Image (cartoon, rainbow, N blue to C red):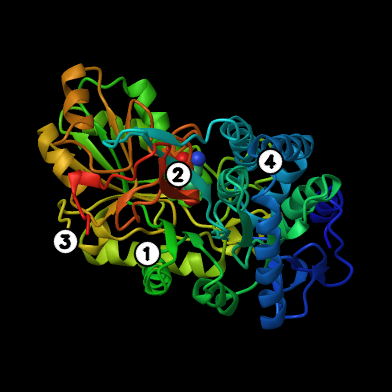
Amino acid sequence: LSSRAASVLNALDIPTAKEVPGVYDGTWTGSGEVLESVCPTTGEVLARVQAASPHELQTALAKSREAYKFLRSVPAPRRGEILRQIREALAAKRDELGALISLEMGKIRTEGVGEVQEFVDIADYGVGLSRMMNGRVVASERPGHSILEVPNPLGVVAVLSAFNFPVAVYGWNLALAFAAGNATVWKPSPSTPLCSIAVTKIVSGVLERNGIPGAAASLVIGGKDVGEAIVENKSVDMVSFTGSEAVGRQVAKVVQGRFGKVLLELGGNNASIVMPDADLSLAVPAVFFGAVGTAGQRCTSTRRLYLHRDIAPSFLSRLLSLYKSLGPGDPLAPATLLGPLHTRAAVGIYSSAIERLRASGAELLCGAAPYATGELPGALHGGNWVRPTVAVPTKVDLEHDVWRTETFAPVLCVGVFDELEEAIEWNNGVPQGLSSSLWTRDVRNVGKWIGPAGSDCGIVNVNVGTSGAEIGAAFGGNKSTGWGRESGGDAWKQYVRWSACTLNFSDDAPLAQGVSFAP
Ligand code: UN1
């Protein structure tokens, strides 16, 4: 192992000499297939991880159900106190975990640390929630009656997370599910196993110290087979899935086919709209970050840019000068802004998107090719390096693939508009509905944008880019993004089952609606 990788792994006690167990259900096991964690920056194999065998998966699911039965009887504020300890334990390792995310996923270090911060923040939020997940008392039409709406935990929540946020998305789910009294079973992306192992070590340490069964937060690393078995399993009450639209559609069908609950966070195809009155000194760097940050691998990355005709030339020239300043670097190094794509396959997806743009007659303003090995510093050989690209298709044709499909890479498509209404139509005219952003100083534009004829996305920003949402608001999208909500807002209400409980304190048993049924 290179010393660069060894120091990151050692700081989190991840043993690399032999295969790392990839299953935790109170004890660490793993005897299924062996997965490799590959560093996207260098191609180096970081570790070999043993996935869950079918039997180990079933055992973990059964133990998680037992753990749920324990956890549901622990008072919610006590669960909150344990979450507070999880928060402290994570915060104590924030930099180390951030570096591991950077090493294994490929995002730059400050974004890796920021991702751990999201977990810390949502844990704080969960601590508060643990004293506020209140039901309601409803006025009954019958004398001496009360109706209570009571939230109780669902049971076992499976969290199927993606490579691009290998820590935070699990955190969003764990914090809410745990505060609400559910056990979780985490199946991370098979290409970021070490992040999930490091996090699970920290979380399970806290659970064990508090006498909570470790299977209250189980980990089952594995590929498609493990994912499918979880999705099909009737003892999993909710499946929270983050990933592609195609897989999400399958997950939804299977889970709904057995009347389970789903929470889906699927594709985004997010647009920024820049009005002629916008403050370009804010808008240009924000669009740059939205499109290029995380090498375009956020669900919320900016993929479409709609510029008002009056400012289009000046906006583009300022944006392109930022693109020109960018070069690939080790994401662990503090000055790096551009990390690699996560997998070799993603380079192929990037290249075919560029091909599609070229074939459609689009003008390619910058980038438009992967880095050849000879163009890279030696330390980056073996990584998945592509040039961030800005393209101007011949027209905004929302039926065309270049506008409709989400390419998980730094490729930005630009269109020019004359009226805000037209730009909003373009914003809404794609299958996805995750994030959107408008740049303007005119409050009338803001009213249109956030109102009924405005953006149809789950995230509707003004003078804020499409990516980088805070945990306090509900996170999620509409349409083919999946309508699910995680994190803040009312998202916690998805992690409970609601009971309407009518209580009769009177000496009569009247029927509702005045019905009389006396023999
Ligand atoms: C994702 O890309 O899956 O808003 C989530 C953001 C982050 C979360 C992105 N807080 O960009």
Which numbered disc flags the more N-terminal residue, 2 or 4? 4
Q: What is the three-letter code of the residue carrying label 4?
A: Arg
Disc 2 element: helix
Mark in the foreground, 3 or 1: 1
Residue with the mark numbered 1:
245
Amino acid at pointer 1:
Glu
x, y percent for residue 336: 62, 40
**Label 4 packing within 10 angstroms: few (<14), some (14-19), many (20+):** many
Determine the CA span between mark 3 and mark 4. 49 Å
Q: Earlier in the sequence, mark 3 or mark 1?
A: 1
Which residue is disc 2 drawn over?
A: 493
The amino acid beneath tag 2 is Lys
The residue at which mark 4 appears reads as: 79
Q: CA distance from mark 3 to mark 2?
A: 36 Å
Question: Residue 415: which numbered mark, if any?
Answer: none
| Residue at 65%, 61% in the rendered image | 192
State the residue position of label 3. Answer: 399
Viewer-side residue, 38 vs 177: 177
Say if mark 3 contacts mark 2, CB within 8 Å.
no
Q: Is residue 203 above or below residue 57?
A: above
Q: Are marks 3 and 4 in contact (CB under 8 Å)?
A: no
Q: N-terminal of the two: label 3 or label 2? A: 3
Indicate the quadrant where residue 188 lies. bottom right
Q: Which quadrant: the N terminus?
A: bottom right
